[in-house]
Image (cartoon, helix red, strand yellow):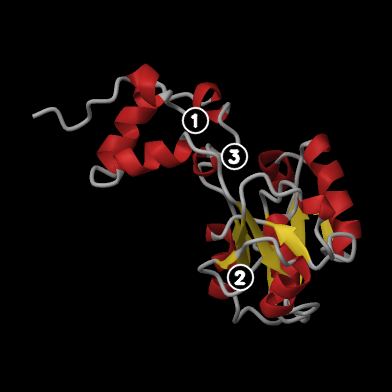
Amino acid sequence: TQLYPQADHMASHPSFLLEKIRTDWPQHASLIMAANNSRPACHVRIRSSLISRANFIHHQHPLPSRKGLAPEAMILPVGTAVKELKGYDDGWFYVQNDGTQHLPIVLADWSGQKLLDACSGVGGKTFHLLDFIDHTCHIEALEPNPSQRALFEANAQRLKLRPKHLWTEKLEAWAEKQPQPIYDAVILDVPCSSSGVIAKHPEIKHRCTPSR
């Protein structure tokens, strides 16, 4: 019996990635590939310190929406123009996948500790931690890519949130200069393949390699 009748070109995934998905998720491979090939819904994180999910829904009426799995997650229609939503300029929400919104819940008991987001990108994890964790927690971020840092700074200004420090060097070079240990926890995207956001950035399927 042919379990996976789709040809590689039909699934528009490179062969090595198809095989990896089939090996790691044999019962869900077809669903994963279908999701990767579909236009994704828009996931946002509601900043409950500023507005509740119920009030956010009320202000966006008649835009259809539904709650996500994370406590502050909302799922909006495909193609939603987020910058035109009420509350964008006031920082009511942040575009962030539902799955990534569970991280601060895991770290909720880190009051008074020192954390480093070592793969901060445009700031999603960093800003969520700053919103969620007790303000006695010392949070720093690291992002060596200048274009990513520019978006980080723009988001920081809109959300009115800022880590204690934003490091700009590559992680390996930066770490060699630091005394040990200096953080109670370090957050890393490992292996940082971006395979979880293929639907949003389909070029990833053709940019990734078996080693990355």
Residue 44 horizontal side relative to residue 11, left or right: right
Whole-number angstrom distance, CA of label 1 to CA of label 3: 18 Å
What is the number of the mark on residue 212?
1
Whole-number angstrom distance, CA of label 2 to CA of label 1: 26 Å
Viewer-nearest residue: 77 or 62: 62
Secondary element at tag 3: loop
Evaluate if marks 1 and 3 touch, with contact meaning CB atoms under 8 Å apart. Answer: no
Amino acid type of the residue tagged 3 in the rendering? Lys
Amino acid type of the residue tagged 2 in the rendering? Pro
Amino acid type of the residue tagged 1 in the rendering? Arg
Decide if residue 133 is in sight here: no
Q: Residue at x 67, y 75 (%)?
A: 53
Viewer-nearest residue: 139 or 60: 60
Secondary element at tag 2: helix
Decide if residue 209 is in sight here: yes
Image: 93 above or below 209: below
Question: Residue most toward the top?
Answer: 9
Secondary element at tag 1: loop
Residue designated by label 3: 200
Question: Residue most toward the left?
Answer: 1
Whole-number angstrom distance, CA of label 2 to CA of label 3: 23 Å
